Amino acid sequence: MKKRILSFLAVMLAFAFIVISCQRTEQEQPATPEGGDNAAVQETPVEEATKDVVDKAKDVYAKVKDYTYDKKADFVAWVKGKSDKYNEKIAAVEKKLESADEQAKEQYKATIDYLKEKKAQLDESMKELDNVSEDKWEETKENIANIIEDMKQAFDDLKD
């Protein structure tokens, strides 16, 4: 049990170190273009999107990390709320599908199929929560966090 906790903490520390080391500090000056004008230097869309994804992942993992095995019932209720919310969102996307043009319909169908698959995984993981032992708690919790983050990202991609 202690080995699992230490392993989990080591992974989280490594993740935090990577995230922190990848971010620019305010003291660092970005390279300037030939003209030497710092105002002309901007982050690329990929860098901005990457920061958004990292920030959103931190939010989900921070919420999940707060739930210890002692707070299992609270975590189950939180996941159930997320699951219900995703059912509503999937239904809303299905309604949009009806009025979408042909090209958008293909994208909506693919996304709906992906979301339903992830939702099924979430439901299966929720069933596991009922009987999960303390030894498997962190693994199950992390699995659920990954599924929720994948679904959140898919919904965000639809908005774009």
Image: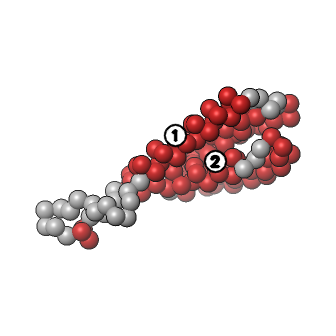
User: Residue 146, located in which quarter of the rendered image?
Assistant: top right
Q: Position of residue 44 (x, y in %)?
A: 34, 56
Query: Where is mark 1, residue-wise?
Result: 14
Query: Where is mark 2, residue-wise?
Result: 61
User: Residue at image x 58%, y 51%?
Assistant: 58
Q: Residues within 10 Å of mark 1 (few under 14, many from 20)?
A: few
Q: Does residue 47 appear to the left or right of 58 in the view shown?
A: left
Number of marks in the rendered image: 2
Q: Which mark is residue 158?
A: none
| Residue 2 vertical position relative to residue 47 in the rendered view, above or below | above
Q: Does residue 56 appear to the left or right of 84 in the view shown?
A: left
User: Residue at image x 42%, y 49%?
Assistant: 21
User: Residue 126, located in which quarter of the rendered image?
Assistant: top right
Q: Does residue 127 appear to the left or right of 152 in the view shown?
A: right
The answer to whether residue 67 is seen in the rendering is: yes
Q: Earlier in the sequence, mark 2 or mark 1?
A: 1
Q: Residues within 10 Å of mark 2 (few under 14, many from 20)?
A: some
Q: Position of residue 102 (x, y in %)?
A: 52, 47
Q: Secondary structure at mark 1?
A: helix
The answer to whether residue 103 is seen in the rendering is: no
| Near-viewer residue (104 or 63) | 63
Look at label 1 and name its amino acid: Ala
Q: Position of residue 147 (x, y in %)?
A: 65, 40
User: Residue at image x 37%, y 64%?
Assistant: 26
Q: Are marks 2 and 1 in contact (CB under 8 Å)?
A: no
Look at label 2 and name its amino acid: Tyr
Q: Secondary structure at mark 2?
A: helix
